[in-house]
Image (cartoon, rainbow, N blue to C red):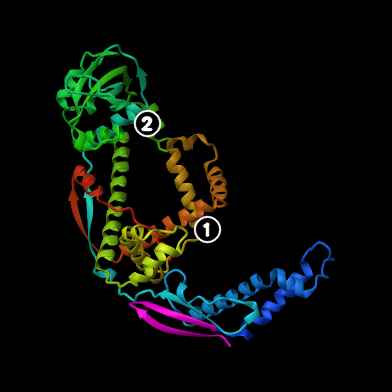
Amino acid sequence: MASIKRENIGLLNDKLTVTITKEDYYPSFEKSLKKHARTANIPGFRKGMVPAWLIKKMYGQSVFSDEVLKKVEAELNHYISNEKLEIFAQPLPLDTTLPSLDMNVAGNYDFAFEIGVKPAFNLNVKSIKVKKYKVKVTDEMIQNEVERIQTRNGKMTDPETIESDENLINITFTETDKEGNVIEGGITKDNSLLVKYFSENAKKQWMGKKKDDAIVIQLKKAFEDKELDIIVGDLGITKSDADKFFKILITKVGLVEKAPLDEKLFLATYPNATIATEDEFRAAIKKDIEGYYEQQARNQIHDQIYHHLIDHTSMEFPVAFLKRWLQKGGEKQRTPEETEKEYPVFQDQLKWTLISSQLTSDYKIEVVAEDLKTFAKQQLMSYMGPQMGALGDNDQWLEDYATRMMKDRKFVEDSYQRISTEKLFTAIETEVEAKDEDIEAEKFARSEEHTSELQSPMYL
């Protein structure tokens, strides 16, 4: 009769030795051979009439190995389930102890595996303290958004020359030296920019310029920090290369005539609201901006919770086992060097998986079909924006769309993780101690740059 011996070989690392006897696997082996005999299609013999000795010769060894290994796997899984072992991934075979299987020498076999046991740990959510940022929406922010909406709904014209920083110019960057001589093999890149994105001194150089005019300029002097980040990224370089010189050639001059602040613009921006005056329009915009920052502030709270749990939850890991699994047990085989390099991130992911799984259980987080359908509808409404008003019966259209997306396996899997994560942090948010802190929009934006993308649990 099969038996399993368990012994500790390291921190949270055990060895399981499965012993099976001939009586455990041989009846299944003989049964499988008989099945092959009934179904084998061998030239010279009628189906079902192939001699047993021939079947055994042709298929015996592979069938024997399969039945032995199936029995070992069944015993191993039963033991892990029966003992309620919380382990990482699957048991790893200890290659040095694998027996040689021979159907002609059927007897007892020992198979050794190692397992990584999940650690025990404590969570104290109520001890978490977070900052709840409150961004004040200024008149300047509202005005900037009004102008952006006017520009988006405006009409493009083609003036001959650049007359203001609102001009849009199509340009070509060509890398040069300080004197404007083109560098062979240097960077060449097309782009489109509003003149106002240049630094104050650079703007003055553009005034009065027209198509086919060019200036030679040093990147770090042409743009302020925020715009410089975008430009160097688009050119495929970094800020350390911002002292490079480029000739910037104008290929087209444009100007967007902003849409007037009238009911036509109000309706285009808010098709489902009745807005008749500019004051009502600005009030609606203010509400949208406040809603945006409230959501971003919640994301910040979630990020603070995540980092507190990661940084303040003490947890041990079977490091040696996990490195061996990372190197050999997954779909991708890794070199020892790759394993060492990737392991720290891998362990952090495992830590979050254990924490989030425990919290998901504690808070009884569930995602049902209706959650997925609602999420699909919200995504579509976000993508479509004001255009949703042109789709006729929105409710039916959204319902049909959500029903189609529910048949998309990737959408369901991805959405499940996002909804589950959101529900979990929303539940934790009610338990933590949050302190309000007023903050300016620009400073808040800088703080967001350090916000992590919350990981979905990885299952190992």
Horizontal and vertical percent position of residue 123: 30, 72
Question: Which part of the image, by quadrant, shows the C terminus?
Answer: bottom left
Q: Quadrant of residue 198?
A: top left
Q: Nearer the viewer, residue 170 or 333?
A: 333
Secondary structure beneath label 2:
helix
Whether the magenta-drawn stretch holds residue 10 is answered as: yes
**Distance between the Cα atoms at labels 2 and 1?**
36 Å
State the residue position of label 1.
369
**Residue 23, image x and y in percent?**
63, 86
Amino acid bearing label 2: Phe
Residue 157 picture quarter: top left
Residue at position x 65%, y 79% from top?
A: 104
Please indicate, yes or no, whether residue 459 appears anywhere in the rendered image.
no
Quarter of the picture containing the N terminus is bottom right
Q: Is residue 54 left or right of residue 162?
A: right
Q: Dot 2: within a 10 Å radius of its alpha carbon, few (fewer than 14), some, or many (20 or more) residues?
A: many
- CB atoms at circles 2 and 1 under 8 Å apart? no
Outermost residue toward the left?
201
Category of crowding for the residue at label 1, using alpha-carbon neighbours closer than 10 angstroms: few (below 14), some (14–19), many (at least 20):
few
Say left or right for 243 vs 413: left
Q: Quadrant of residue 182?
A: top left
x and y, in percent, of residue 109 in the image: 55, 82
Residue located beneath label 2 in the image: 266
Residue 165 image offset from top left, x and y in percent: 23, 22
- Confirm whether residue 309 shows in the render: yes
- Magenta residues, start to end: 1-19
